[in-house]
Image (cartoon, coloured by chain):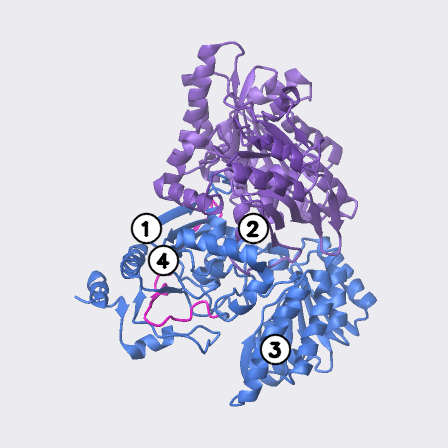
Chain colours: A purple, B blue
Amino acid sequence: MDALGELTAALPDHVVVTDPERIEKYRWDRSQDPNTGTPVAVVRAEDAEQVQVAVRWAAAHRVPVVPRGAGSGLSGGSSAVDGGIVISLERMTAVEIDPTCQVAVVEPGAYNKDVKAAAAEQGLWYPPDPSSYEFCSIGGNVATNAGGLCCVKYGVTTDYVLGLDVVLADGSLVRLGGKRIKDVAGLSLLKLFVGSEGTLGIVTRAILRLVPAQQERSTLVATFGSPTVAAEAVVAIRSRLRPSMLELMDQPSIRAVEQHRSMGLDVDAGALLVAQSDAPGTSRTEEIALMEKACRDTGATEVFVTDDADEGEQFVQARRMVIPAVEELGALMLEDVGVPVPRLPELLAAVAEVAREQDLSIPVIAHAGDGNTHPLIVVPRDDDAAHLRALQAFDDIMHAAIRLDGTITGEHGVGRTKKSALPEQLGPDVLALNQRVKDALDPDGILNPGAIL
Amino acid sequence: MDALGELTAALPDHVVVTDPERIEKYRWDRSQDPNTGTPVAVVRAEDAEQVQVAVRWAAAHRVPVVPRGAGSGLSGGSSAVDGGIVISLERMTAVEIDPTCQVAVVEPGAYNKDVKAAAAEQGLWYPPDPSSYEFCSIGGNVATNAGGLCCVKYGVTTDYVLGLDVVLADGSLVRLGGKRIKDVAGLSLLKLFVGSEGTLGIVTRAILRLVPAQQERSTLVATFGSPTVAAEAVVAIRSRLRPSMLELMDQPSIRAVEQHRSMGLDVDAGALLVAQSDAPGTSRTEEIALMEKACRDTGATEVFVTDDADEGEQFVQARRMVIPAVEELGALMLEDVGVPVPRLPELLAAVAEVAREQDLSIPVIAHAGDGNTHPLIVVPRDDDAAHLRALQAFDDIMHAAIRLDGTITGEHGVGRTKKSALPEQLGPDVLALNQRVKDALDPDGILNPGAIL
């Protein structure tokens, strides 16, 4: 029996996909990485044991394994590898809420929104909220240490991971952490697997911390003459407050949204801040008032405040709509660079400079309160020269972030599309340290080879 | 020149201590580990470079290195090793606040309270608050991933670490993370070093996240017939709320405090809960009312509420006073076991059972809202039989916690005194994984050998 025959024999028929047509969609994630490969098979695992069977087989034959959740990744972390297999977790979608422990026990294929919904039924809340929360999986969230809009106050995925089941490179399964809230027994391996993008192991179950349901929110929308001025308002706000949301859209983003679907945004504004406070009682009014003052003092042209939840949600929806709206303007290269909050104005200026230099449209949205920006490089379709300039812009923006004491990725992960800039950010010693840990846990390098390192 | 001569020659005279009398106090941490060793020298480093010089020397000569902060550790993580050196960070105490970034840049020898004080000057707050915050160092806090009283709402040390400078086993220094809030570039090595108890590297600088100053607090004190009933109230509260403090004291703890210094506690109460809410505005009243109802419904004998900060602080002080008060009753073996919150009543019952079986007094205090308890095993002085029974009780309590899906250490670390129970908690596979990471980062095993693994 050939190697592939061994795999199909070891798993139920409906689990292993080898038909090239059916394989096609498992080759890509949302980054549409042009260098993606073609796997020999996709294992659509139904449980942890099937993941173990597949990894044991891969280990025996030294076959690359690419784990895959919902395929919504933006850095090519789930691009397939030629001759490898993809292990898809899309069928493992169970979500179980333990309200007394205030935790969710979740399989990796479950969507973020499903965890939120199940928690809400018990009056609980799972805060991390990537813009893609309606179609991204918890496995992917854990793999990238995903962030989102509420992170400015509520932190990122790793802050909510209490336990993980992980299938290691040899196919063994380890159970890390549990439903206990505090646990310092042994090295922090749990946290090491969060953000490891499938290069150290495959998560088959996560225990996630929940918190009491979020309080009512008030929303502030402020317009500014330019993104840089808006960013200065962000710096002023963040030096005093930790609002529950602090998002930025620049003029091209606003206009893309209005073109896509009219949301009543001011298309003449140089930039827009959408901020929320969920502080209870009168504190909410106070927080909003402080933010309003900071905006006006910095030079906001207009400030609008609403306590109406639906009205506020419309602005948040407008913000979430930017990426699909910009995708209509051309192919998209999505950046994810971040800097310390006070350097946000400089980063935005640097992105504008790159856009000018490369003669490209680069709308910018930002989880501004965290200093995390998403410059959206628009690549005119069927324009090879523009494509090359876009690649250059993608690199230039990462280098600009590094120069500003920042990072090439705040929440999307390094994957394959940002790998080339990682050495510059980390430096040779930290890079070598990453490799040592990788080698210790995956000596044959079968787990998601080519991602991160 | 002999090896030690090389070390003294490589560093300023006042940095290397070899006088046995002066060395003595560097042999012990607060756990008073009877198996501590005698080092050949203590390096009282003044900066990261001196730490590097010492570690390079140790690496060249394969000499064990024990890093040491304030020596307030409770698990023997800083017990000295025969023939090794101690690197004391006590002289590296700089604290610098960057208010615009809302971070503190801190040397490892600075005390937790110094960071809190410096942050407070800027209207900011560093939440983690071990009971020992007045005399424990940030380096130790990072090494153990220290917790405290406010963790039930505000999380533990790792949640606040944005950056670390770490001297590795070969003496090289790596800089991980930075002042950026979100950063997922590369593996989560930053989080791996937090809680590694000096076995993977020596922290020479930490960048800590700060948050806006804590709001006013209201305090609730409730008495119960027994610790188990009090624990049931905790379960009821925690299934709905996340108060900013939820501490438990049992009757022997209460009585020890009252004997030590009268604080007006009810010595006939079977147990006491001290809870706080720092929710803003009317939400505070609501949270306190919900907690009061949960206490009364569970069978509290008395409930007292105060909005007066000083009055509330007295109860918190009484809670913090338990350990010194119990220390007057005999030698102390301090436990740190934790369980998922709903299993807290079972854990307290198990501890009581161990106390009966071993005929020992074991007062219990708990960060109850996190399921983290500190059974305080009182060992009558100069009673060898009781000492043996106490050792047995120490083990029995750890095993009881493991049986209840819990942990042998919630916040103090494994160090050397809890090492024997670690294999049972982690199991062989996770233990082996710990060892693989350790070996990858410290192949010659010179960093804090004997701690954790």
Q: Residues within 10 Å of mark 3 (few under 14, many from 20)?
A: many
The x and y percentages for residue A122 are 78, 48
Q: Are marks 2 and 3 on the same chain?
A: no
Cα distance, mark 4 to mark 3?
35 Å
| Kind of element beneath mark 4 | loop
* Residue matched to label 2: A190
Cα distance, mark 2 to mark 3?
29 Å
Q: Is residue B452 left or right of residue B240?
A: left
Can residue B308 be seen in the rendering of this structure? no
Q: Nearer the viewer, residue B221 or B430?
A: B430
* Residue matched to label 4: B444
Cα distance, mark 1 to mark 3?
43 Å
* Residue matched to label 3: B393
Q: Are marks 2 and 1 on the same chain?
A: no
The label number, if any, that marks residue B172 in the structure image: 1
| Kind of element beneath mark 1 | loop
